[in-house]
Image (tube, helix red, strand yellow):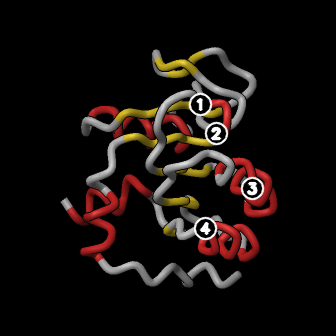
């Protein structure tokens, strides 16, 4: 994929998305300094409810971690994915089993065409090759 290529969501659309507060972070890490740790930490500081999704850990940053998105017992608005592009499809296939998801967000450098199409067929918004932290800082 051409890494200059990003989704066509407008800034107004992104601002609306940032109004959603429950974010499942797939591939979240307890390791300080990794984007999959400092990005969700930033979002927590900005008032978002972060739900770690990582089968290896019981909890990350004080929040209970779940093996997969479909295991989360409460509402999820956004699924923020920190996984390699080739590992995104099973994540999205699992996530769409959970009702009420509004947005699939693939972090900077991440894009999976099939995952994007599956989500869009379910009327779930898709953002890709963008950092949820950098876009928040740019817009707010």
Q: Secondary structure at mark 3?
A: helix
Q: If you read the primary sequence from the N terminus, does the residue marked by circle 3 or circle 1 appear first? A: 1
Q: Secondary structure at mark 2?
A: helix
Report which residue position mark 2 lands on.
69
Local packing at callout 1 (Cα closer than 10 Å; few below 14, some 14-19, many 20+) is some
Q: Position of residue 2 (x, y in %)?
A: 65, 84
Residue 123 left/right relative to 110:
left
Report which residue position mark 4 lands on.
122
Is there a contact, CB below 8 Å, between mark 2 and mark 1? Answer: yes
Q: Distance between the Cα atoms at labels 3 and 1?
A: 15 Å
What is the quadrant of the C terminus in the image? Answer: bottom left
Q: Position of residue 22 (x, y in %)?
A: 40, 40
Report which residue position mark 3 lands on.
93
What is the quadrant of the N terminus in the image? Answer: bottom right
Is there a contact, CB below 8 Å, between mark 4 and mark 2? Answer: no
Q: Secondary structure at mark 1?
A: loop
Q: Distance between the Cα atoms at labels 3 and 4?
A: 11 Å
Q: How many marks?
A: 4
Q: Distance between the Cα atoms at labels 2 and 3?
A: 10 Å
Q: If you read the primary sequence from the N terminus, does the residue marked by circle 3 or circle 4 appear first? A: 3
Report which residue position mark 1 lands on.
72
Q: Distance between the Cα atoms at labels 4 and 1?
A: 19 Å
Q: Position of residue 21 (x, y in %)?
A: 33, 43
Q: Of the residues tagged 3 and 4, which is closer to the observer?
A: 4
Local packing at callout 3 (Cα closer than 10 Å; few below 14, some 14-19, many 20+) is some
Which residue is painted at 71% across and 29% down in the image? 67
Which residue is painted at 50% across and 79% down in the image? 7
Comparing 36 with 101, the one in front is: 101
């Amino acid at each position: 994929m051409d890494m200059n290529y990003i989704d066509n969501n407008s800034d107004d659309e992104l601002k609306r998305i940032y109004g959603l507060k429950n974010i499942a972070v797939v591939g979240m890490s307890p390791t300080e300094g990794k984007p999959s740790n400092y990005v969700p930490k930033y979002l927590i500081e900005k008032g978002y409810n972060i739900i770690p999704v990582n089968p290896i850990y019981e909890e990350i940053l004080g929040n209970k971690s779940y093996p997969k998105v479909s295991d989360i017992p409460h509402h999820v608005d956004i699924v923020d994915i920190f996984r390699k592009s080739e590992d995104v499809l099973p994540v999205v296939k699992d996530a769409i089993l959970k009702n009420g998801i509004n947005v699939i967000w693939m972090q900077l450098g991440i894009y999976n065409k099939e995952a994007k199409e599956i989500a869009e067929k379910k009327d779930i918004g898709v953002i890709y090759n963008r950092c949820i932290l950098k876009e928040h800082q740019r817009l707010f």
